[in-house]
Amino acid sequence: MISLSAIVEGDGEVAALPVLLRRIAEWRTPEVYVDVLAPIRVYKDRFLNREDEFNRHLKLAAAKAGDMGWILILLDADDDCPMSKGRDIARRASTVVPHRAVGVVLANREYEAWFIAAAQSLDGVRSFVCRQDDGKVEPEVPRNAKGWLRDRMASGAYRETTDQPGFSARMDLQQAFDRSRSFRKLCTEWSRNSEILLKAVT
């Protein structure tokens, strides 16, 4: 069995990412069964800036994933360049757990940018109202993606721990793939690592 152990930075991602990854699995690699384990939540700044925290959480993820598993590190890029920052994190991780495959994805700028990319498919979901021109918005440009969503919630509130998994379950994956480079990176990491491990066990 192939297992995936993810490291994330928010309570919303703890609930939402397994939902999203299982949907990506059905869409991208239906021939591969991957056991998506409960994510490990970290404090981003401490995880990235304290070597002991970085090493401890990676070794925990490696132990959870097992010999036939891989690790996904998913963080918000915020104001960092997802490509260069992601390469740096991947390089550091490879020295800590060289015996595990590690994929690094930095959502540009936040996980919620993927919902902006798929905004048209979310119209009417959990009180979200998609405006006429929202399909033309560059999804990875708004710095406060959560605020962008909040402004379009008829309820007047965006709640990460409930809305994030709810949107992850309903968003159009192809729409997000077409409009978000960082979402394409997530899908690429999923397919690449899952298929490599599948070959190793067959």
Image: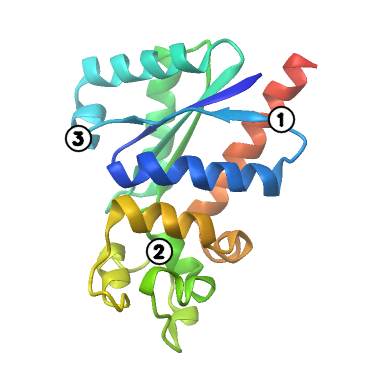
Identify the amino acid type marked 2. Answer: Glu
Identify the amino acid type marked 1. Answer: Glu
Q: What element carries label 2?
A: loop
Q: Work out whether residue 23 can be spotted.
A: yes
Give the residue drawn at x 40%, y 50%.
Answer: 107
Compared across the picture, whether 138 is left or right of 185 comes to left
Q: How crowded is mark 2: few (under 14 residues within 10 Å), some or many (20 or more)?
A: many
Q: How crowded is mark 1: few (under 14 residues within 10 Å), some or many (20 or more)?
A: some
Q: Work out whether residue 109 can be spotted.
A: no
Q: Where is residue 197 in the image (x, y as percent from the top left)?
A: 68, 22
Q: Tell me the quarter of the picture where residue 176 sits.
A: bottom right
Q: What element carries label 1?
A: helix
- Residue at the extreme right of the image, as rendered: 202
Compared across the picture, whether 114 is left or right of 148 comes to right
Q: How crowded is mark 3: few (under 14 residues within 10 Å), some or many (20 or more)?
A: few
Of mark 2 and mark 1, the one earlier in the sequence is 2
Disc 3 to disc 1, C-alpha distance: 32 Å
The answer to whether 18 is drawn above or below residue 1 in the figure is below
Give the residue drawn at x 20%, y 35%.
Answer: 45
Q: Tell me the quarter of the picture where residue 114 sits.
A: bottom left
Of mark 3 and mark 1, the one earlier in the sequence is 3
Give the residue drawn at x 74%, y 15%.
Answer: 201
Question: Relative to the observer, which residue lies in front, 116 or 180?
Answer: 116
The label number, if any, that marks residue 140 in the structure image:
2
Question: Relative to the observer, which residue lies in front, 52 or 170?
Answer: 170
Q: Mark 1 points at which residue?
A: 195
Q: Mark 3 points at which residue?
A: 45
Q: In which quarter of the image is the N terminus?
A: top right
Disc 2 to disc 3, C-alpha distance: 22 Å
Q: Tell me the quarter of the picture where residue 30 sits.
A: top right
Q: What element carries label 3?
A: helix
